[in-house]
Amino acid sequence: MPENAGQKQAITDFLLQVKKGLKLVEEIWIDREVKRPGSEGPLCNQAESLSGYPISTITELIEDDLNFCFQHQNFIFRMIAADAGSGKTAILNYIQQRLEANHSDTGRIIIPIYTNLNNLLTSFSSQGFSRQFYLHLISEVFKIALIETLEPRFKQSAARSLEELFPEELNLVNLIVTSKKSGAVKTKLDKLLIESGCDLLETFLEIVQHFKNQGFYLFFLIDELDSLYQSERSKDAVNTFRHLINQIEDDYQGKLPLGLYISGLSDDVQKFIKENPALKSRVYPGEIRLVRFRNQECEEIRAKIDNRLYSAYQGYKDFPEFKKEVQSIDLKAGTDFNSLREFCQRYGSEVLQIHQKYFKHHDKSFNQFEFQSRIKLEELCIQKWSQQLGNAPSPISGPFNYQGHQQWKRFSGKQGYKLIIAQTTTNLEGHNFDGYAELRHNGDVIAKAFGEAKNYELLTSHFTTFKAWLADVRFYGKKSPPDLAYLFAPGCPNLLELKIKNTEIVFYPLPKEPEMQSQNSGDKSKVLKPLEPGITNNLTHIESVVLVPSHPQVIATDPETAKEINSVDVTPTEVESTPKIPETLIKKSGININTASLDDLIQAFKGSGMRKNTIEKISQRRPKFLYKNLDDLLQGLGSTNNVKNKLQDKLDSGEIYF
């Protein structure tokens, strides 16, 4: 089956996720702008920094909270108020995945605990909300620590905590610690806590403190506050949260590194806060209020979807018709959708229907990108294994048949070391790797290198599939010399890049050469470029956004379809014969994008509307490749057309150059 069949399935799975409109789809996560409460009226997302440092986006707020809580040892309590489908659960999911991807980046191990109040209230208890609440939170912590964690020290710390808290109940503690199922941990732990007669709030805080002393920190993400009103337990919950906040303030002066985010519908959060004036004064600074949507947010989501598809299919026979139909999609705010979720559902559905009609014909453009990735894999292998190969190993000529094909390059290194690298797809353990190489010594394979190439921004499924394939071929990156594994693509979502960094896989940003993106690359005007936000995307604008508060009513983990080996062979001659596009003539008296310091870049981009974290990403990518033009610079960043136009003005005036 040709490669584009597998590629089409990966894109289909992505669009199905978008169409569902549930939870976080990290590939279309946008850094929503936030303002201080009251600074610009109610037509924007509102939140205030607890640390006092200025924040302008949701992601900056989250990072500031994590730093304030765990680096500076402060208790944080936030409530997210939003109408249905406005993104409150996505924020909780983002924090959970952010911490799971790299929970130790602050020098401390932060464990996210996600739960919802609806599960808590499914079983009736005459003992009241407070008891159920703390029993539930404590059992969730120990279920993760004893059953689900991949961190053995966390399990050891959990066992030690129970032994120290309940020295007279060591038999029951041992039964809990040796339990094999989450349900058994909860049942036995509830029994221990209830029969001991301990103060559950004090015990909860002692557990938090014990984990802190062992280097582990807890962050609770609690959804569905609205279920409290359905169960008529809101007043009990208000007292529970007020007592928790007061206890931490009284006993720890607020200096307890513990995080709680609680989300609910706008009206319910407002009722909850107003029911108790004392709680309001404590909670109000930590409230996050989200509007249902802003037109700019929908534009950014649409651009993320469109750019990924355009990058994937440029050069395919059916691409012009596909692009025309996608651009003709016209959704009217207030009629076709009333929230971010509804926009994703409607737009994802429309694009999916168009996508399924096209791309039945085999294409050559993807194979050209595969060829580029193999060149880069060769460079990386020589670099990483230079101790064995030297900096310039000698080519070896002659036929070589191995792993079912004869398309190999071979090099001779130092003292019996050799490198062989495949020039086509190689099948290993039933998986077709785009790139494959072996380091050999006197005929023995001592290290291997694997590469996967995607000619569009990575999807989470690419990472999970590649990771599973590497396990099947017994990849081992910790030996010397190490096995190597690379994911090549023009871009990668920030959260996914964080997940990849926590493994032995390396994401290597590999820009698509402009001349490879057109079937007639000799004509510069015909080079196809990804759609930038704001360009003919037919999202009908309205003058305002919906006010908050209002009165409202897997990732596929299966490997992609196997690719047909040697379906199209692209030679270096074919690629090199493609005419190059002349660079834009620019003055050289301004800031060189490829060599300027981060501070100089920030100053150079001032007035373009580009955010600081985006500029930092541009700077971080430079060691791996040089930017040649604006399309190259902005690839995978989701920048708006307005930003691009302002940068073009700076380029034309000579303020910046490549």
Image (tube, grey):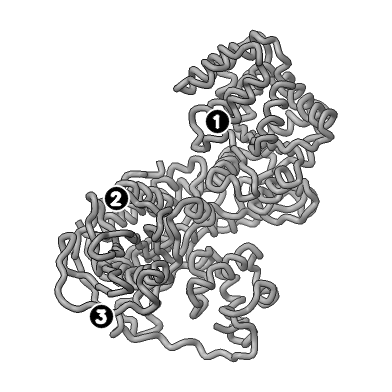
In the rendered structure, find residue 155 and report the number of the disc placed on it.
Answer: 1
Distance CA(mark 1)–CA(mark 3) = 57 Å
Three-letter code, disc 1:
Lys
Mark 2 and mark 1: Cα distance apart in space: 30 Å
| Badge number at residue 473 | 2
Residue at x 66% of width, y 32% of height:
211
- For image coordinates 65% across by 39% down, the residue present is 215
Mark sitting earlier along the chain (2/3) = 2
**Horizontal and vertical percent position of residue 342:** 51, 45
* Residue at figure coordinates x 62%, y 41% from the top left: 110
The amino acid beneath tag 2 is: Val
Residue 309 location, quadrant:
bottom left
Q: Which quarter shows the N terminus?
A: bottom left
* Dot placed on the residue nearer the N-terminal end, 1 or 3: 1
User: Relative to 416, is 199 above or below?
Assistant: above
Q: Is residue 410 above or below residue 55?
A: below
